[in-house]
Image (cartoon, helix red, strand yellow):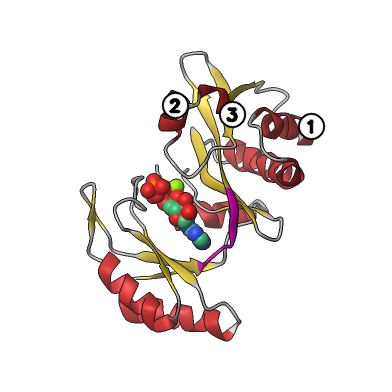
Amino acid sequence: MDLFEHQAKELFAEYGVPVPAGKIATTPEEARAIAEEFAAAGTSRVVVKAQVKTGGRGKAGGVRLADSPADAEEKARRILGMDIKGHTVHKVLVEEASAIAQEFYFSFLLDRANRTFLSICSVEGGMEIEEVAATKPDAVAQIPINALSGVDRAKAREIAVAGRLPAEALEGAAELIERLWAAFVDEDATLVEVNPLILTADGQVKALDGKV
Ligand SMILES: Nc1ncnc2c1ncn2[C@@H]1O[C@H](COP(=O)(O)OP(=O)(O)OP(=O)(O)O)[C@@H](O)[C@H]1O
Ligand SMILES: [Mg+2]
């Protein structure tokens, strides 16, 4: 079963993986009320994100930044009801906007052909990984995971280094990758993908998107 982004992020949070704070709205008025709560707590910029089980939401106009609660209402009004690749948008995630310094790609998956688990990590994130693999194959690391030994902090660090993540993101990414492995195993998942995984302006590593 696929999860919506907001469900994937709730799961990540249970495992201690840093994600932006956010809430679900099914009407523009609800989106405004959520943005007002963020504004009252000191965060005026939010991102309104279509919740559909398909990629390419950003490109389709289903992910929009809002500068104020009124703007969040307006953006939600535009996104709710949209059709994205045959999926109608019935709910939006209203979350705090992150100050993005860099976007990376990370995933764990079941490699059926080789009967093993695989991790894919790249310093080039935010866009589709197939595209990156085609244009910059050297920037995409594929690391097999031994199912018995799994992913400890050292293995997680090896994955982040292989993906050429910058030095300032390594520790945060390794911690996040180790925690994602626990989620992947406990949930019997066949895919856990974070695109983008980000480094924020203040040096934190966070999951900005989630596919499980
Ligand atoms: N909370 C946020 N704060 C700031 N920017 C965000 C936030 N969430 C998403 N974005 C920006 O929007 C982009 C697209 O978001 P996301 O990856 O969640 O959607 P997507 O469906 O995978 O979109 P696409 O496939 O078109 O890239 C991100 O790469 C990021 O630049
Ligand atoms: Mg994405």
* Disc number lying in front (3 or 2): 2
* Residue drawn at (58%, 38%) of the image: 184
Question: In this view of the protein, which residue sits in the foreground, 41 or 129?
Answer: 129
Q: Which residue is mark 1?
A: 154
Q: Disc number at residue 20?
A: none
Q: Which residue is mark 2?
A: 135
For disc 1, the neighbor class at 10 Å (few under 14, some 14 to 19, many from 20) is: few
Task: Residue 4: tell me if it is visible.
Answer: no
Amino acid type, residue under disc 2 in the picture: Thr
Q: Is residue 29 left or right of residue 37?
A: left
Q: Quadrant of the N terminus?
A: top left
* Residue drawn at (65%, 51%) of the image: 15
Q: Earlier in the sequence, mark 3 or mark 2?
A: 3
Alpha carbon of mark 3 to alpha carbon of mark 1: how far? 14 Å
* Residue drawn at (27%, 73%) of the image: 77
Amino acid type, residue under disc 1 in the picture: Ala
Looking at the rendered structure, the secondary structure element under dot 3 is strand
Q: Earlier in the sequence, mark 1 or mark 2?
A: 2
Disc 2 under 8 Å from ligand 1? The reply is no
What segment is highlighted magenta in the picture?
96-102
Alpha carbon of mark 1 to alpha carbon of mark 2: how far? 29 Å
Q: Earlier in the sequence, mark 3 or mark 1?
A: 3
Question: In this view of the protein, which residue sits in the foreground, 199 or 96?
Answer: 199
Q: How far across and how far down the image is residue 59, in percent?
A: 33, 50
Looking at the rendered structure, the secondary structure element under dot 2 is helix
Q: How far across and how far down the image is residue 136, in percent?
A: 50, 26
Q: Which residue is mark 3?
A: 119
Instruction: Say whether residue 100 is magenta.
Output: yes
